[in-house]
Amino acid sequence: MKTILFVCTGNTCRSPMAEAIARHAAGQGRLPSGSALFVGSAGVGAWDGQPPTPEAVRALRSMGIDHAGRSKPLSREMIEKADLILCMTRSHVESARRLVADRPALKDRIQLLDPAGDVADPIGMGQEAYDDLARDFAELIPSRISAMLPS
C-alpha cells in the first residue's frame, strides 16, 4: 500500500480538501495504486482534533465529496511512513524536511503539491476562494500524483 500525505499549516482548509479530493479520485480509479492507496493530511502548526472549516466542507460537498476528518499536527513518524508528502507552500516543505533532517533519503519524498508555486491559503477569503481551490485541486492532484507515484 502506498501512502500520500498532504501538508498545510492548520490542517483545516487546504490539506483536508486535498486529502478528500485525492481519496475521491482514487475511488474513481483516477490515481495509481487505486484501492491500495492511503491518503492523509496534517499541518505544520495544527492543533489536534479541529474540524475542517465550514467553507472547506461546503466546497467539497458541492463536488459530491464528504470529509469528516480532524486536524493532526505533522510528525516525523507520518513523514517516515509516507511514500509521498505534498506540501502547499515552500515553507511547509522546509518544515517537513527539518523534521527528518537526519534522514536525507526522505528529502525527495517531500515536494510542493503545485510545481508552479505555493498554494494560497483561502482562510478568510470567502466561499468562492474555497470553491476555486477545490476545482483547482480536482485538476492538479490526479496529474501530480500520477507523475510522482507511478503504479
Image (cartoon, grey):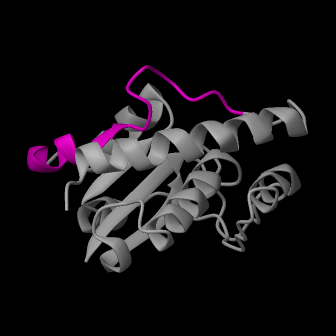
Q: Residue at x 38, y 36 (%)?
A: 93
Q: How far across and how far down the image is residue 81, in percent?
A: 27, 68
- Direction from residue 78 to residue 8 in the image, left or right: right
**Which residue is nearer to you in this view: 34 or 127?**
34
Q: Residue at x 24, y 53 (%)?
A: 149
Magenta range is 103-121
Does the magenta-highlighted stretch encompass residue 114? yes
- Direction from residue 3 to residue 120 in the image, left or right: right
- Quadrant containing the C terminus is bottom left
Q: How far across and how far down the image is residue 63, in percent?
A: 74, 57
> What is the residue that sits farthest to the left in this orientation?
105
As displayed, is residue 23 above or below residue 133? Answer: below
- Direction from residue 140 to residue 137 in the image, left or right: right
Q: Residue at x 37, y 60 (%)?
A: 31
Q: Quadrant of residue 110?
A: top left
Does the magenta-highlighted stretch encompass residue 48? no
The answer to whether residue 82 is visible is yes
As displayed, is residue 79 above or below residue 112? Answer: below
Q: How far across and how far down the image is residue 91, in percent?
A: 45, 29
Q: How far across and how far down the image is residue 24, in percent?
A: 56, 66
**Which residue is nearer to you in this view: 105 or 36?**
36
